[in-house]
Image: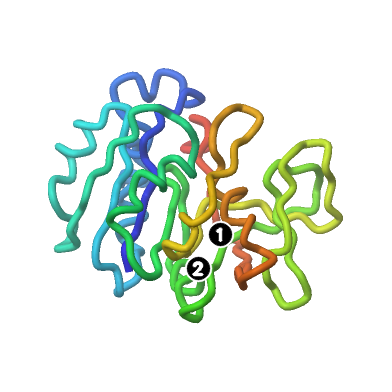
Amino acid sequence: MKIIILAAGKGTRMNNLTDDIPKPLLTYEGKTLLEHKFDILPSSTTEIILVIGYLRDTIRDYFGDSYNSIPIRYVVQNEMRGTADALWHCQDFLEGHFMVLMGDDLYNKNDLLRISSIASDEWSVLVSPDTTGIKVGSMVKDSEDNLEQIYNGPERVSLYNNTYTGACVLTPEVFTKPMFELSSGEFGLPQSFTQFAEEKAIKVFETDSWTRITSPEDLK
């Protein structure tokens, strides 16, 4: 299985921490945010594809062509046009199931195994349960734990919210429909694959150990 990690952004909310270092190379408990992900990838991983942009050469120089014998391919996203656009840059290198992860979030090894243990005709998504309020990008599942819909705006409230963690397993079929354009002009990946929810099974897995790194306080 190939692993795509989206690591192109600057991380402007990290303030001066990312002036000279791309956000995925910031350290937490002695390891970079990218290494935290590399170290928990499924044993079936055949290649890591890093989508890079801001300070791209810093990431290339840090890791080189492989990590613990797993080959690394670099794909450049010159314009920050959203997570779907980042994935679409990789489509020529993908076949069969592949996993997508965010470059700046922390995941659990068992969760990555769970979302990759799906049938060959299924997709999967990892969500964090949240029922405390309005969430942009909250996902709703049906009685069989399949993705039903995603709420795209803050005016939409779900009685049962699941926050998208940025982790999912897809196949190249996702490229057969156009990317979903957000009101910001960027193209959203979860909104893009949710377009398939009525025609294929997208299994929803819940986690209680996802950590989103969005500010210096999160690292502390």
Residue 171's place in the image compared with 65, above or below, is below
Pointer 2: what residue?
A: 111
Pointer 1: what residue?
A: 209
Residue 163 is situated, as x and y percent measured from the top left of the image, at 66, 51
Residue 118's place in the image compared with 130, above or below, is below
Residue 50's place in the image compared with 206, above or below, is above
Residue 202 is situated, as x and y percent measured from the top left of the image, at 60, 68
Measure how far apart labels 1 and 2 are at the Cα level.
Answer: 9 Å
Q: Nearer the viewer, mark 1 or mark 2?
A: 2
Which residue type carries mark 1?
Ser
Of residues 133 and 194, the one nearer the viewer is 194
Q: Secondary structure at mark 1?
A: loop
Residue shown at the point (62%, 48%) measured from the top left: 191
Residue 101 is situated, as x and y percent measured from the top left of the image, at 43, 53
Mark 2 Cα-neighbour bin, 10 Å: few <14, some 14–19, many ≥20 = many
- CB under 8 Å between discs 1 and 2: yes
Of residues 106 and 118, the one nearer the viewer is 118
